[in-house]
Amino acid sequence: MFIRRTLPILIAFCIGFAMLIQYFIPHPYSERFYDIVVQQWFITIYAFMFIFAYRSFFSHHIRKVKRRKTGYIFSIIAIASALLMAVGGFATRRGDFFDSLYNYLYAPLQATMFSLLAFFIASAAFRAFRARNVQATLLLVTAVIVMIGRVPLGDYLWRGMPDLIEWIMTVPSMAAMRGIRIGVGLGAVATAMKIILGVERTYMGGT
Amino acid sequence: MKFWQRFLNLDRKWIFLGIGLVVIIPLLFPLRLPVKPSKPVIDLFNRIDTLGVDNGVVWVVTDFDPGTMPELMPMTMSVLRHCLTKGTPVVLHGGLWPAYIGMAKMAMDNIAVEFPDKKIGEDYVFLGYIPGVTAVILAIGIDIETTFGTDYYGVPYDSLPMMEGVKNYEDISIIVDISGTRSPEYWLMYGQQRYGVDVGIGCTAVSAPSYYTFLQSGQFVGMMGGLKGAAEYEELMERYGYPTGRRPATVGMDAQSFGHLLIVVLVILGNIGYFIVRRGERKVGIERRKE
C-alpha cells in the first residue's frame, strides 16, 4: 500500500511543491536544484517512459494474438512493424535503412491516411452542413466566407475578402478562443494543485 | 423536386472523384494564383530578415510528421533557405517527439543539395531529437551542450564551430517552431515566458485560429498559418530576391483554392436542394392532411 499509493503521492507532493516555490527563489541552491531536476531527472524519467510504452504495447498485442481475438492479424502486423522500426533504428542508427523505412514506408502511409480526410470532409460537408436553424446558418455562412477567403480565389472574387477574413480571425474567433483558453488555464491550475496535494489520484490507475 | 432528391442522395464516389480532379489538375498545371502576404507572416519574415550573423542562431524546430508535411515542409524549407542565403547561422532541431526526426532529416538532405557550398557544423547544425518535450525546452535554457551532447551525426557539440559560444537561449535570436501539434504553446510557456526568447511559429491551418491570441499579445513574433502562410512566405522570399525553389506552397494553394471552391459549391447546392425538398415534403403533408 505504501509503495503503490502513499509513496507516489509523497513524491508528487514534494517535487511539485519544490518546483512551484523554486520559481520564486532566485538563490544559487534553488537554481542548482532546478538544473538537476530538469536536465537530469526529467529527461531520464521521460526516456524510461518509452520502455513502459513498449512493454504496454507488446503485452496488449501479444495477449490479443494468444487469445486469437477478432483482428489479431493486425496485432501481428503492429508487433512486426514496431520491431522492424526499432531494430532498423538501433542496428543502422542514422543509416540508410532506417531513413528508407521512414521515407518510403512510414511517410507515404501516414500521408495517405491524412490525405483521405480531404475526401471524407468534402462528402460530410455536402451531407451534413445544412442551415437548419439560426446558429447552423451563422456557422455555415462564416465557414463559407473563411473557406473562400483563405485561398487566393477569394481575393479574385472580392478585393475586400482578405481583410474580412483577417477581421473574423482577429476579432470574433479570437475572442471566443481567448475565453476558452482562460477557462482551460484555470482548469489546468486547479488540476495541478489537486495532483500536488494528492486529491487527484487517477494518474496512478485508481479512482 | 425529384432532381434535387437524387442530387441529395448523390453517391459519394462522385464527390471523391470531383475532389481528386480539382486537386490533381492544378498540381499538374499550376496557375500560381497571386498570394497577398498577411501581417503575421510579414512580421515573421521581417524578424528573420533583419537578423545578422552576430545576432545569435535561428533555432528551427520540426514538430510535425508526414501527415502535415505538405503544409509544413514548405515553411521549414523557406525559413532554412532564408537564413542560409543571408548567412544567418541556423540550427535544425528534430522536434520534441520521436516521429518528427525524419522530417528534419528530409529538410536537411534537401538543404545539402540546394546549398552545396554551405558546410554542416559551420553554416548550419542538425541537432536531432532528445526525449523530454517540455524538459528539453527548459534544459535548452540551462545548457544546450549538456542537453544534446552531440549533433544528429554524432559529432560532439564542442567540435561544431558554429555552436562555439552558443550556450542557451541568450545566444538564440529566435525559435521558429514549425508544428502540427500543440508544441508552440510549450515553447511559449517554457521558452518565451521563462527565458524571454523570441518565438515565431508555422502551424497547420486548423490550429492557426488558436494562436491569434498570442500574436495579439506579442508573445509570438509572427506566424505562418497553414499552406496559405507558407505561400505568403514564399511570396515575400521572391519579392526580396531570395531563392524559393519550385514554390510548392504557392502551387498547393491553387489546388486548395479549387478544392475549397468545389466544397463551397457542393454545400450551397446541398442547402438549396435541402430547402426545395423540405418545402415539397411540407406541401405534400398539408395536402394529405386536407384529404
Image: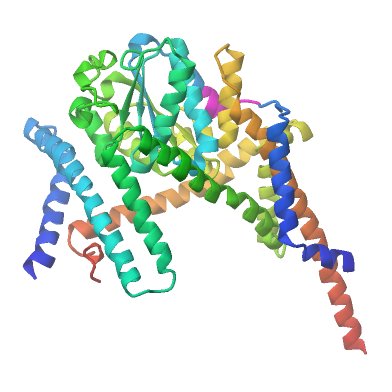
> What residue is rendered at 47% in x and 12% in y?
B85
The span picked out in magenta is B36-44
Q: Which residue ends up furthest to the bottom in the rendered image?
A: B291
Question: Quadrant of residue A165 in the image?
Answer: top right
Is A8 positioned to the left or the right of B113 in the image?
Answer: left
Image position of B221 with respect to A146: above or below = above
Image position of B270 with respect to B57: above or below = below
Q: Is residue B202 rendered magenta in the image?
A: no
Which one is in front, B191 or B161?
A: B161
Query: Which quadrant would the C terminus of chain B be assigned to in this image?
Result: bottom right
Image position of B189 with respect to B171: above or below = below
Is B127 positioned to the left or the right of B159 in the image?
Answer: right
Instruction: Give the color scheme: rainbow, by chain, secondary structure or one colour.
Output: rainbow
Which one is in front, A156 or B26?
A: B26
Coordinates of residue B41 in the picture (x, y in percent): 54, 27
Q: Number of callouts in the render?
A: 0
> What residue is rendered at 85% in x and 70% in y?
B279
> What residue is rendered at 58% in x and 11% in y?
B241
Question: Quadrant of residue B148 in the image?
Answer: top left
Coordinates of residue B89 in the picture (x, y in percent): 36, 15
> What residue is rendered at 30% in x and 46% in y?
A86
Coordinates of residue A71 in the picture (x, y in percent): 44, 69
Coordinates of residue A6 in the picture (x, y in percent): 10, 65
Query: Which quadrant would the N terminus of chain B be assigned to in this image?
Result: bottom right
Residue A152 appears in view: no
Which one is in front, B135 or B13?
A: B13
Question: Quadrant of residue A53 in the image?
Answer: bottom left
Residue B16 appears in view: yes
Q: Main secondary structure of the magenta part?
A: helix
